[in-house]
Each structure stands twice: as structure tokens, then as C-alpha cells.
Image (tube, helix red, strand yellow):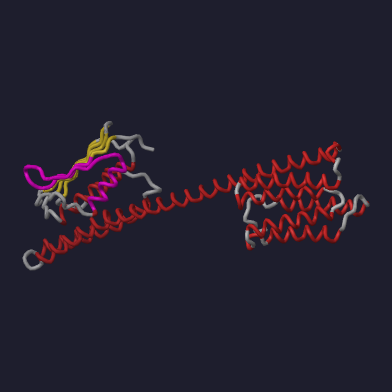
Amino acid sequence: MALSRPVPWVSPVLYGAVLLAGLYAWLAGVGDTRPVPFVAGLAGLAVLDRWEHRIGPVLLLALRVGLCTLVASADGAGLSRVLFVLVPFTAYFTFGRTVAVALAVGCVVVMAAAGLVRDPHWLADAGQVSDLLMFCVGLVLAVTMAAVAAEERRARMELAASAAAVAELSATAERNRVARDIHDDLGHHLTAIVVLLEKAAAFRDLDAEAADRAVADARGSARRALEDVRRSVRTLRESFSLEEALSALVDGQTDVVLEFSGEEGGHDPAALRALYRAAQEGITNARRHARATRVSVAASLDPRGAELVVSDDGRGFVPGSEGYGLLGMRERVELAGGRVDIGSPPGGGTRLTVTIPRRNAP
């Protein structure tokens, strides 16, 4: 049943119980049951529940009260009065707690007034009073169940909203990560290829052997770019080694010198990857912007933390000239709990320093 309220099984259970009791009373000759309006009223309530999302809330409430009254008036057994607990129960999900409690009180008042009309002395009948008290208990339970169900639905909606927000944040973080990876990996190697091909073109007529070496180096950079793409795909499944990654990064690059010291065990893999990306960016910037002829990469790991220094003999760093690559590097390092310092030392060139305090590997 396509009901807009929670616990949709409550209404059918009550309808079935009232139907069985009413038919038994009619067949056994207990009371004055009129089967046609009795069954028609229950069928109308079932149809009303089925189509309640297409009916206005006020009209829906009025129709439900009217049909419950019809069934109760046609039931000689008297059990049909239990249907009135559905009035505040269903109203709770549409109008809220205040209206539901008011309707519950109204049902008790109407039930007591109807009893007094039938028999002015019915309050002296212990059985009648007991029925009224049980009806009050049913109303209390119905309103309580509605409150619990409404709170549960609200919690589920908040949880769904929170899950959607987390998914969006995760997607944004993943997009930023992919953007940084593309820039750091492919950008680094494509820059190297461009520089080498320019060198080959410049030396083609002057030094054919140097040009051939530049073309070979460019071919090697292309292969390393492909290997970096494959390594990125395997990142989540395999362990990361900073020393191996840096060695592969500078392999075949005669203008880059690597120094590595310390043990990687116990260091956060995110910090090690951040150092590797910083080395990529530092080498790329040294070639692309500083026009450096020699680059030094020094990585050291100790119990206090990790440090990476990339220095070159190029034109030096101009403050305020940071681009997307350096911005992505700072984001990576800050996420790992570290800091980035970049500037031009007195002797010239550029010096990039990345320091990340040691945190236990997760």
C-alpha cells in the first residue's frame, strides 16, 4: 500500500479484526449488526488508505471520521469503536502532535457523550466504564506509536541527507585528488618530454648525437608517464615505497640527483605520497619555469618526521607566482599535517622544503 505515513500495517490489522468480530456477531445473532453498511464502511476505509496521498488532509480527516462512524453505528458487537484510534494516529503524521492529542481528547468526549445519550446512567455500569478506559488506553498507545514512527522517519530523512552530503564531499575530494594526480604525474612527464624535444630540435644540426639522446630521453619520459598512470591505478591495492617511487622518478634524468636516507616503516603513507608529489612538482617547476640545468632532490626520514628538499640552479622563485601545481602540493601536504616553504636562497636558484611531522601509519 502506497501510504504516506510510516507503519502502514496498523490500519489493515484493525480493519481485519473489526471485520471478523462484526461478521461473527452478525452470524451469532449478537447485537444488531447491519452487514451491508458495516462491510461497505470498512471497504471505504481501505480504499481511503490506498488513495490518501491524492486527497487533501482536511477532507481526508473528515472522510475517515465519517466512515469510522458509519462502521461503528452498523456494528452490533461494539468492537468497531476501536477504529477511532486511527483518527489521531493518522492525523499525527499530517498535522502534528498538538492536533493529534486534541483529536484523541475529542474522540473520548464524543464516545462518552454517545454513551450518555443511549443511557443516562451508563457511568454506573462497570463494564461500560471499563470499555471507555480501554479506549483511552488505545488512544494513548496510538498517539505514542505515531510519535515514535514520526521521529524514526525524521531521523531516516536526516541520515539520508547527511549521507548525500558526505557522498558529495567525497566526490569533490576525489575530483580534487584526480586533478592533482593528473597535474603531478602527466604534467611532470609531459614537461620533460617538451623540454627534451625542444633540445633535440635545437641540436639537430649542431650535434646530432645530443639530439638523439634527447629524443631517447623523451621516449623514456613517455614510458615513465605510462608507468605512473598504472601506478596510480594500483595505489589503493599495493603498498607505497617513497624510495622506489623517487628512484623511478629520476631514473634516466641526468640533470637530477637524488639523495635518500632513513627508514619508511611507521610513517604515514599519505605523508610519503605527499613528499613524492612534492618532488614531482619541484622537478617540473625547475625545468618549466626556472630553466634549471641541475636539480637536487634530498629526502630524509627519521623518528621525528619526514623532510624533502628540492633545489635547483635556475632563475629563482618569484613570490606570488604560485600556480595550480604548488596549490595542489600545499593541499596534499597540509592534509598530511605538514608545511611547505619555498624561496630563493642567497646563492641563487630555488629551494623547496616540505616537512611533515611523523604520525603513526594507519
Foreground residue, 354 or 243? Answer: 354
Vertical order, 91 against 222 (above or below): above
Residues in magenta, as a range: 325-354
Vertical order, 361 against 173 (above or below): above
**In the rendered structure, does residue 266 fall within the stretch colored magenta?**
no
Foreground residue, 306 or 91? Answer: 91
Residue 270: x and y in percent read 33, 43
Residue 274: x and y in percent read 28, 45
The residue at the point 77 percent across, 46 percent down is: 111
Residue 56: x and y in percent read 63, 61
Specify the quadrant that holds the N terminus: bottom right
Looking at the image, residue 320 sits to the left or right of residue 61; the answer is left
- Which residue is most to the bottom? 205
Looking at the image, residue 197 sits to the left or right of residue 327; the answer is left
- Which residue is most to the right? 29
Residue 178: x and y in percent read 34, 55
Task: Identify the image quadrant of residue 65.
Answer: bottom right
Foreground residue, 323 or 184? Answer: 323
Task: Identify the image quadrant of residue 43.
Answer: bottom right
Q: How many marks?
A: 0
The residue at the point 77 percent across, 53 percent down is: 15
